[in-house]
Structures are given as structure tokens and as C-alpha cells.
Image (cartoon, rainbow, N blue to C red):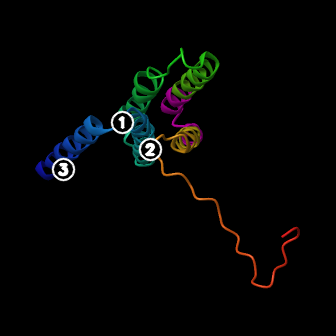
Amino acid sequence: MYARNAANAYSNVGLQTAAMNASPHRLIAMLFDGARTAIARARFHMEAGQIPEKGLAISKAIDIIENGLSAALDHGASEELAGNLDALYDYMARQLMLANLNNDDARLTEVDKLLGDLASAWSQVDPDREPQAEPQTALPRDAVLIGA
């Protein structure tokens, strides 16, 4: 038990350090990761019949979605996009609540997929992301170029 508590404390310090040094873009990515990790834990606890632990994990995922992702939306930048995302986050939170009440793994899977899709899209607009080089197509040595 002590080793688990020590490992959790060490993990929390590492997470806090990462969050303090992260860009705003990275913080949102960390929220996506945290919500998905909480859902994975909920699924594990659901399969093991550990109802209180499942409920705590789902509550953590809901908290991240409502008080992290939804609260971080910038309605001034794009009201339509922020409104759509806000509605999607609300839908996800309701699905997680129903998953908890009904032990419904399909709802957990659905929300995890939605979060994964959003996280993937979010990573594509990372301002610190290295630009992808365009694939270079080599011409054969004996290729004839028209108009050359």
C-alpha cells in the first residue's frame, strides 16, 4: 500500500511539473489524455466489478470535460465552434453519467472515441508542431520533361 501511495505521489508531482511548464495548447492535450485515462480506468473497474472505483473514475472524466475542456473554450474566437464543442462536451458528460448508472461499456467507448478524435484534431493545429515535409517524388533519370 505504501509503495502505491508513493508511486501516486511521484506521478502527481511529475504531472504538476509538466502542467506548469506546458503551453496552453499542450494543457488542452493533457486534458484530453486525462479524460481518456479516467475512462480507461472506469472500464477496468467496471469489468472487475469495482463499482465505487468505477464511479470515481467516471466522475473524474466528467470533471475534466466540464471543468477543463468546456471551461477552456474561447467563445470570443469562434462562437459557433465553441458552441458546438460545448454541446458535444455536454453530450459526453451525459453519456458518461448514463454509462455509470447502467454499467454501459458502449457509452464509455463512444465518449473515448469522441475524445480521441478531438485530441487528434487538436494535435493537428498545434502551433509548436513541426511542419510536415511534402513528399518528394523523384523522377527517373531518363524522364523527359515537357516544355523543358
- On the image, which quarter does residue 86 sit in? top right
Task: Give the amino acid at mark 3.
Answer: Ala
78 shown above or below 64: above
State the residue at coordinates (55%, 44%): 124
Residue marked by disc 2: 128
Judged left or right of residue 25, residue 95 is right
Taking the view exactly as shown, the residue that stands out farthest to the front is: 148
Local SS, label 3: helix
Q: Nearer the viewer, mark 3 or mark 2?
A: 2
- On the image, which quarter does residue 37 sit in? top left
The rendered magenta stretch, by its main secondary structure, is classed as: helix
Q: What are the residue bounds of the magenta stretch?
A: 95-113
State the residue at coordinates (39%, 44%): 41
Judged left or right of residue 88, residue 25 is left
Q: Position of residue 35 (x, y in %)?
A: 43, 37
- On the image, which quarter does residue 75 sit in? top right
Q: Nearer the viewer, mark 2 or mark 1?
A: 2
Residue marked by disc 3: 7
Asked whether 132 or 91 is in front, the reply is: 132
Disc 3/disc 2 C-alpha distance (Å): 31 Å
Q: Position of residue 1 (x, y in %)?
A: 14, 49
Q: Position of residue 80 (x, y in %)?
A: 64, 18
- Dot 1 crowding, Cα within 10 Å, few <14, some 14–19, many 20+: few
Q: Position of residue 67 (x, y in %)?
A: 40, 22
Local SS, label 2: loop
Disc 2/disc 1 C-alpha distance (Å): 9 Å
Q: Are marks 2 and 1 in contact (CB under 8 Å)?
A: yes
State the residue at coordinates (44%, 44%): 128
Asked whether 90 or 42 is in front, the reply is: 90
